[in-house]
Image: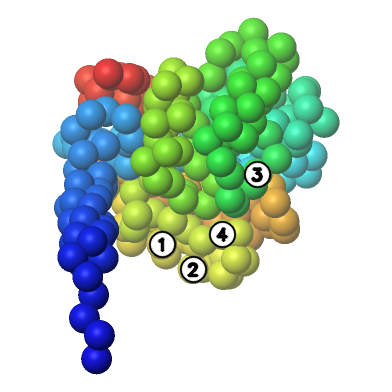
Amino acid sequence: MKLPGLKTSLVIILFFSFALASFATEKGRPYYEKKGFVLWEIKTEDKVVALTFDDGPHSTYTPQILDLLALYDAKATFFVVGERAEKHPEILLREIEEGHEIANHTYTHPFRISPEQLKKELDKTNKLIYDITGIHSVLYRPVGGSYNEQIINTAVEGGYKVIMWSWHQDTKDWKMPGTKNIIDTVLNGTTPGNIILFHDAGGDRSQTVEALKVILPELKKQGYEFVTVSELINQSHVEVNK
């Protein structure tokens, strides 16, 4: 058997050294939380939670959700898809008028995206939100919650804070798991400072609407206050960017 030459051996050693170094320096949740670049939830003893809705607006389900939120004096953050917001500016205006928050969920909702494409999508959606509401959005949620260092750095360099959600508070309502499953996920898992993930578009969201009819009054009965993500950030004293 022919052994590799010195030059080949050095190349192999350097390759694996680089790979190991890259693995060792892989940045995860603790790093991004410490830097203040990404938020999953906050630590607090106050009974506050942030309800968030992705993929909207939708002409049917978003107004129904807004009606329920108004009924229980609940504020929420809507991570809108630009091309859908463009079709329903009146819904964005209603969200703002009723004290909710609008955030960025890209323009076309792509599951895979380059840093260059992401910047264009964020900027286009942010301009659209501003043109409709007069408000600049600084919050961004990656599609599907999928992120890497390039995505985080691109968002942060653009002046955004990346917002995820409490991992135990993913209702998976986009899968239509059944109203009871959505209710159980939220009510069995809610703790102060949680960010809860729902969807108000991207498919049939009737189960989400029905689940909220139970979730909102029950959490309110338990003493919870429903706040926007920005209000949650302000309470945690976490800077939007560092």
Lower sequence index among marks 3 and 4: 3
Are the residues tagged 1 and 4 within 8 Å (C-beta)? no
State which mark lies toward you, 2 or 4. Answer: 4
Q: Nearer the viewer, mark 3 or mark 4?
A: 3
Spatial separation of the CA atoms under disc 3 and disc 4: 17 Å
Quadrant of the rendering where the C terminus is positioned: top left
Q: Dot 4 corresponds to which residue?
A: 173
User: For residue 23, which quarter of the picture?
Assistant: bottom left
Marked residue nearer the N-terminal end (2 or 4): 4
**Which of the two residues, 65 or 177, is positioned nearer the viewer here?**
177
Q: CA distance from mark 3 to mark 1?
A: 25 Å
Tell me the residue that label 3 is attached to.
Answer: 109
Quick one: label 1, few (<14), some, or many (20+) residues within 10 Å? some
The residue carrying mark 2 is 181
Q: Are marks 2 and 1 in contact (CB under 8 Å)?
A: yes
Residue 2 in the image, given as x and y percentages of width and height: 25, 85
> Which amino acid, by three-letter code, is at mark 4?
Asp
Lower sequence index among marks 1 and 4: 4
Residue at 70% x, 19% y: name it. 128
Question: How far apart are the two marked residues, 2 and 1, measured between alpha carbons?
Answer: 6 Å
Q: Is residue 92 visible?
A: yes
Residue 186 in percent (x, y) is at 40, 56
User: Is disc 3 in contact with disc 1, using a CB cutoff of under 8 Å?
Assistant: no
Viewer-side residue, 158 vs 144: 158
Kind of residue sitting beneath label 1:
Thr
Marks 1 and 4, Cα distance to the nearest angstrom?
10 Å
Please report contact status of discs 2 and 4: CB closer than 8 Å, yes or no. no
The three-letter code of the residue at mark 2 reads Asn
Q: Which residue is mark 1?
A: 185
Work out whether residue 207 or residue 234 is closer to the camera in this orientation and state it. Answer: 234
Q: What is the CA distance from the residue labelled 3 to the residue labelled 2?
A: 26 Å
- Categorize mark 3 by other alpha carbons within 10 Å: few (<14), some (14-19), many (20+): some
